[in-house]
Amino acid sequence: MGHTNFRQSLNKRYSALTGQLEDVRASIARIHREVEKLPELEARIPQLERLIDSARLLLEDADPDWQEEQAPPVKPWTHHIPVPFGQCGRRGMQVLRKSEVPMTVREVAKTVLREVGCEAPDAETLRRVQNAVEASFRKFRGRTVESSGKYPAQWRAINKPEITFDP
């Protein structure tokens, strides 16, 4: 006996409904797990407030001109640079491909930041971008980029051997 359109549609609908049911149950389980954390998180708030007040007192004692705005809140494990996530290495490689001279990681990082509209980056942002670019260069050393091997290392695209490193 063949499958009728009606039976096939019901079978498809049944599959969709059971999939939705599994998603709803998973969401409910996740919410229950989060609700279980609520008392622990609420108990942490007064402790954090006391620690913040203590740190504020010590900072004001050490520097009477200190203002809270000098230390904006930072969330750990978040993306802190103006370059889109996962793009630092690629953009650094593009800079080297376009360059006609060997460049240090710092020069490449400054160029990448300029390209995303950050003309005067603070030291921490520059350091973060430098680390990301350098990690990418080290990963691709010998395949797409090569280094002078001296400090500070100069880099060039591997397809541009005519570019000579500075002595």
Image (cartoon, rainbow, N blue to C red):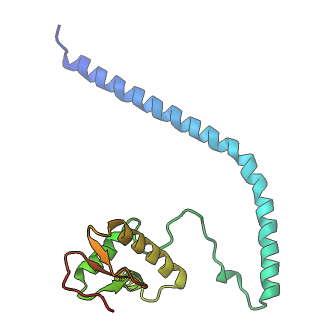
Q: Is residue 90 left or right of residue 23?
A: left
For residue 6, above or below residue 76: above
- List x then y, in percent, for residue 95: 29, 80
User: Closest to the observer: 44 or 89?
Assistant: 89
Residue 14 in which image quadrant: top left
User: Closest to the observer: 118 or 21?
Assistant: 118
Q: As drawn, which residue projects farthest toward the left?
A: 2
- List x then y, in percent, for residue 153: 39, 82
Residue 135 in which image quadrant: bottom left
- List x then y, in percent, for residue 37: 69, 45
Residue beneath the point at 32% across and 26% down: 13
- List x then y, in percent, for residue 124: 54, 80
Q: Quadrant where the N terminus lies?
A: top left
Q: Is residue 143 left or right of residue 67?
A: left
User: Closest to the observer: 148 or 108?
Assistant: 148
Q: Quadrant where the C terminus lies?
A: bottom left
For residue 26, above or below residue 124: above
Residue beneath the point at 32% across and 67% down: 140
Q: How many marks?
A: 0
Residue beneath the point at 46% across and 29% down: 21
Q: Is residue 49 left or right of residue 119?
A: right
Residue beneath the point at 18% across and 85% down: 162
